[in-house]
Image (tube, rainbow, N blue to C red):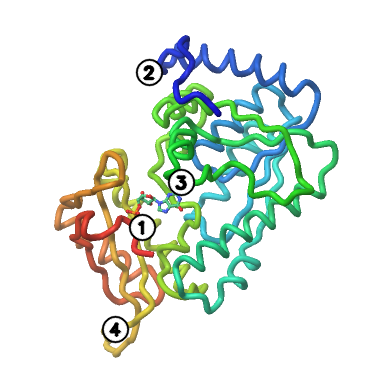
């Protein structure tokens, strides 16, 4: 059974110099563990997997094979950023898999939130396993497991979401270089590794992605409305200096329409719901007091720039009673 304490020698990483020391130690450990063998990593573009990728690239370069699965439920610009940062700037050995059609076909007509989550999770493992089987001589699997993941699985709060899941024919030794770090430490290490701020300090984003914000059965047109409205919200929050201040902010598109007017004509279109919340641990949350003129500006942009949308609503509900996501 793993011990529920970090090693005694482990100083909390609070500054760049401590991050540099950690990076140097990990590079030595990774090289000792891996030798000249190849390592596989599912690179989502989230903080943890991105930091692991950057660390491994520093340690073993192109012996690391990154697989970025685009499930079609990522935010606008995310797959492009993964390719730019890792393939173009860090010369990573990166396999990009555009699996959007596969995921969306499997999700067609499925409206139950838990079933949607299951389909997305299973399909992800399926796609990743297919890519892994095409590769030869891979002996290691790198994962962005962090200390809270280990604590939560030890306490039975959640199954350790990184561990396993792969079919039996794919057995790898694990490489988990950030497993003793808390999230804030992972971010400091990421910054020291030269990752961009919008990758290192980004807001939480669920694994099933925009799939939980396109309510009911996902359709491509409504998913596009979620993605485009989310991009506008992020752009406007960044412009207003709220991006680093508000804990989480995003848009939701429900699966019903209401009457509106566009160009003098009646239109039946979807509403977009805005959510912007603050919290420490996501167990409870308060609603951000967004300036009214900013809300009006966002409404104007979304109703004019996003196809199929004729209303914008702001969710005033704290958690509880509302959860942060709608699902
Ligand atoms: P709720 O909606 O339960 O969400 O209030 C609490 C926080 O968890 C995030 N969330 C997820 N994060 N994988 C994740 O890594 C997931 O499947 C997932 N689902 C929800 C949510 O965005 C919020 O920050």
Task: Give the labeled residue for mark 3.
Answer: 158
Q: Residues within 10 Å of mark 3 (few under 14, many from 20)?
A: few
Q: Which mark is residue 14?
A: 2
308 with respect to 261 (left or right) = right
Residue in view at x 47 percent, y 55 percent = 75
The earlier-in-sequence mark between 2 and 3 is 2
- Estimate the spatial distance between the alpha carbons at disc 1 and disc 3, rounded to whole Å: 34 Å
The earlier-in-sequence mark between 4 and 3 is 3
In this rendering, is residue 187 above or below 44?
above
Q: Where residue 221 sits: x, y (%)?
A: 48, 74
Front residue of this view, candidates 296 and 206: 206
Q: Which mark is residue 258?
A: 4
- Estimate the spatial distance between the alpha carbons at disc 1 and disc 4, rounded to whole Å: 22 Å
Image quadrant of residue 99? bottom right
Q: Secondary structure at mark 2?
A: loop
Residue in view at x 62 percent, y 44 percent = 83
Q: Secondary structure at mark 1?
A: helix
In this rendering, is residue 62 above or below 226?
above
Q: Are marks 1 and 3 in contact (CB under 8 Å)?
A: no
Q: Which mark is residue 320?
A: none
């Amino acid at each position: 059974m793993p011990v529920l304490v970090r090693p005694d020698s482990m100083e909390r990483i609070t500054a760049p110099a401590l991050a540099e020391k950690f990076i140097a130690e990990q590079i030595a450990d990774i090289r000792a563990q891996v030798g000249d063998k190849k390592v596989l990593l599912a690179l989502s573009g989230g903080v943890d997997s991105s930091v692991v990728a950057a660390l491994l690239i520093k340690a073993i370069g192109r012996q690391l094979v990154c697989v970025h699965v685009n499930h079609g439920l990522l935010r606008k610009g995310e797959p492009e950023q993964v390719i730019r940062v890792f393939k173009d700037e860090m010369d990573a050995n990166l396999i990009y898999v555009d699996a959007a059609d596969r995921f969306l076909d499997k999700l067609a007509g499925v409206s139950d939130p838990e079933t949607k989550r299951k389909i997305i999770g299973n399909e992800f493992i399926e796609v990743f396993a297919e890519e892994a089987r095409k590769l030869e001589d891979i002996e290691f699997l790198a994962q962005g497991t962090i200390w809270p993941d280990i604590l939560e699985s030890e306490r039975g709060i959640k199954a350790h979401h990184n561990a396993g899941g792969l079919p039996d024919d794919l057995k790898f030794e694990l490489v988990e270089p950030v497993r003793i770090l808390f999230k804030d430490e992972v971010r400091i290490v990421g910054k020291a590794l030269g990752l961009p701020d919008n990758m290192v300090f980004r807001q939480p984003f669920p694994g099933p992605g925009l799939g939980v914000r396109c309510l009911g059965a996902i359709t491509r047109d409504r998913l596009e409305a979620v993605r485009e409205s989310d991009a506008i919200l992020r752009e406007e929050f960044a412009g207003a200096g709220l991006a680093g201040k508000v804990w989480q902010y995003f848009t939701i598109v429900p699966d019903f329409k209401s009457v509106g007017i566009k160009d003098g004509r009646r239109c039946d279109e979807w509403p977009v719901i805005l959510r912007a919340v603050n919290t420490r641990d996501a167990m409870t949350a308060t609603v951000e007091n967004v300036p009214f003129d900013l809300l009006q500006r966002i409404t104007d942009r979304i109703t004019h720039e996003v196809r199929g949308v004729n209303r914008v609503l702001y969710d005033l509900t704290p958690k509880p009673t509302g959860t942060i996501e709608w699902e």
